[in-house]
Image (cartoon, rainbow, N blue to C red):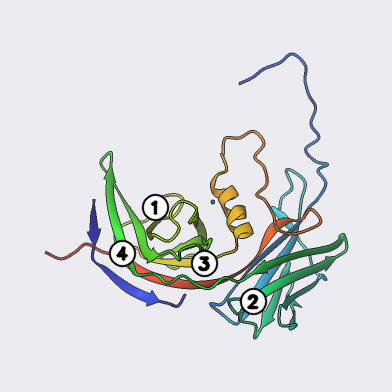
Amino acid sequence: MKLLRFYILMSFAFLLVSCEDLIEVDLNSANPKIVIEADLNDLSNKQMIRVSRTVDFGAPISSEAITGAKVTVADSKGRLFEFVDKGEGLYVKEGFKPVAGLSYNLTVNVEEGVYQSSTKMDVFVPVDSIAIKEETLFSKTYYSVVLKFDDPKDIPNYYKYDIAINGKGFKFASAYSDKFNDGLYVSHQITDRDNSIELGDSVVVRRQCVAKEVYTYWNDIQMLNPGSAAPANPTSNISNGALGYFSVSSAKEYGLRVVKESN
């Protein structure tokens, strides 16, 4: 293994048993669930929340967008932010940049009922260094991004990483807890879930310091077994049986290019 020299493009721009009796399962009559995806952060003053509804098995769409909902977020200073329905299940609030240390309450009012959640925005834990790591396994070369930092002592910290490769959209990469390395100098090794980073790629890693319940949601996703006959839904922090999550995080983005060191 060796560490490669890297170029920072952007910095701080900041997931057989058989039996004789046949069991009939009606795959087309599952009760629809409300899905709320609310990932707010301080990278921008434009926040977006998606509200949708699950659909029957075999439907031509993966989910049904919900329009006409009333979506609001209130902070612990008493300020209320009303999100605007932009269509296709997307709700947007301009001029809203969350502040670390404050608590936030989400309320989504739709035809089925009212869905609520609360979370606190933790302060960002700064990164000390960042590099590209090269590893060879069974004659194949793999690349990952390594971030090193001092984890604050005696404070529970939770980290979520997304990754974008060559200008494509961000995808979830991994989530970490400091349960076993509280207060230590920590290394987080990040790659996409397909291990597809290659020499010459431009990579952007988004690091978010999230609340415990948000970590739980994403940790459930990264622990899912694709071969499971009936994988469980990740643990939501939204009331009334809704799926999804509500997160307000401090975040930064780090951009690098994967290059060989010149001799």
Which element is circle 3 on?
strand
Dot placed on the residue nearer the N-terminal end, 1 or 4: 4
Q: On the image, numbered disc 1 is attached to which residue?
A: 196
Q: Of marks 1 and 3, which one's residue comes earlier in the chain?
A: 1
User: In this figure, which residue is indicated by the disc labeled 3?
Assistant: 208
Q: Position of residue 80 (x, y in %)?
A: 76, 81
**Taking 163 as reference, is 226 above or below it?**
above
Q: Which residue is nearer to you in this view: 1 or 142?
A: 1
> Residue 22 is drawn in which quadrant?
top right
Which residue, as the protein is rendered here, is positioned at the far top?
A: 20
Q: Amino acid at mark 4?
A: Ala
For the point 43% across and 64% down, the residue is: 151
99 horizontally vs 34: left or right: left
Give the total of numbered labels. Answer: 4
Label 3, label 4: how far apart the Cα atoms are: 18 Å
Q: Amino acid at mark 2?
A: Leu
Which of the two labelled residues, at mark 3 and mark 4, occupies the earlier sequence position? 4
